[in-house]
Amino acid sequence: MRLTASLRAATPHQHVTQVLPTVDKKGLLTGGFGKTSVLPTEGGTAEDRRRARRIRNIRDFIRLQVGDGTGLVITYHGAEAEFTGIPGVDVAHFNAIAGLDAFGVVDCLFVIGRPLATQHTHRDHAVALTGMHPEITELTDVVDYILMRDGRGEPISRKGFVDPSLESIRRAITDAEVIQAVGRARGVNRTADNPARIFVLNDVVLPFSVDTLTSWREITPDVVEKMLGRGAALLSPSDACRVYPDLFCSEEAAKKALRRAQVTRGQTPIITTYMDLSPSAFLIRYQARGARQKKREALCMPGRIDWLRDQLEQMHGPLACFEVTGMQAPVNHENDAEDLMDEPTATTAIIDLAETRRNRCHAATEQAPQYAVSMGETIREWSNARLASLSYTRVHIEAHPQKAA
């Protein structure tokens, strides 16, 4: 039998992000995705609290990435329950996924950790297959290279065996199962209409290319991202601690956390940073009724605007103002200058909500609430999509071109 070619299926519509464990300045592993980092433990020790915090952060990361879409988490059997209950997300565990074909349309797939047998298991398999006893049976740090989409090889440090027979068995147990997990998204079958986003949270060197290589330290959700993952990030400390009491024990705690989030983003304003997410977050400006009430701001994910307004009205009662601002559509530079001059630079649509809302009615004498949406030339498409997900029965849309600056 002669091998004439080594072929790999192209996956242009599969984007793979590999997240490596965090290593401190001394080169020590401070945050990984092994069982000692992910499996929950009961008790009040610092280690128990660290594991619980790691699990919460991973859950928030999954929420933020999935948004209103669908996802699949594949992890350890003992950690499976920790990731159940996330809207739109299914959960499975290693060594129970081969052949599953029900997740070929999920938007996101998360592989958390990797199965790893004991050193004794590796040794026993090696002896059974080769008849020889390896001299060195301990796992050690091995330098390996991750293949990037552009053909580069990024060096990483991972655990492995010096003995070739032990290393072959490790690859068959560990690496092969991670490859099986990634394959559940059926990346080779994806098109531009249904791309797959894969997040591999481990140090396994995969046989296919990776688009983004990062570390958990770099992508751990901050407090704003944690709120966005749940629907909306309120930039008012008093409102944030009331909507998310599990994130903030007090208004002062919320104020400090929001301040830290701005600092970690450098000099980029916090609003524009998070409106650059995909899908983009909408900027909300709202104002409670009453004297000396100022406008406050929030960032809201698509599909959660109705929920956010309900939360705000539960706190403040009927709002005096609720404005939704979206990103302006990009300019099509293929058009010539004369055609561009005829188009408005931005458009504001006033959506009159004189309708019966879910679970309650506005009195006929009360001024109907409004959304003020600043958008580009795609306003009509956006409006149709948004109104389809909101509970309104009658709308009135007025388009007002804004003057160019």
Image (tube, rainbow, N blue to C red):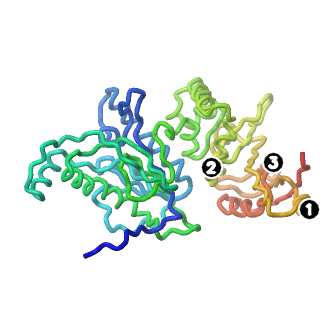
Is residue 26 among the parts visible in the rendering? yes
Name the residue at 35% across, 67% down.
Answer: 100
What residue did someone put label 1 on? 338
Query: Is label 3 in a helix, a strand or a loop?
Result: loop
Nearer to the camera, 246 or 181: 181
Instruction: Single out the residue that lies furthest toward the bottom.
Output: 1
Name the mark nearer the viewer: 2 or 3.
2
Name the residue at 28% across, 74% down.
Answer: 2
Q: Disc 3 residue type?
A: Glu
Q: Disc 1 residue type?
A: Glu
Give residue 209's position: percent from left, percent from top: 45, 57
Q: Say which quadrant the C terminus sits in.
A: top right
Name the residue at 50% across, 61% down.
Answer: 14
Q: Earlier in the sequence, mark 1 or mark 2?
A: 2
Q: Disc 2 residue type?
A: Met
Marks 1/2: CA distance? 36 Å
Total numbered circles: 3
Rendered image: mark on residue 301: 2
Q: Earlier in the sequence, mark 2 or mark 3?
A: 2
Name the mark nearer the viewer: 1 or 2.
1
Name the mark nearer the viewer: 1 or 3.
1
Asked if marks 1 and 2 touch (Cβ < 8 Å), the reply is: no
| Residue 370 to residue 292: above or below | below
Rendered image: mark on residue 81: none
Is residue 34 among the parts visible in the rendering? no
What residue did someone put label 3 on? 366
Residue 254 in the figure: left or right of residue 374:
left
Query: Is label 2 in a helix, a strand or a loop?
Result: loop
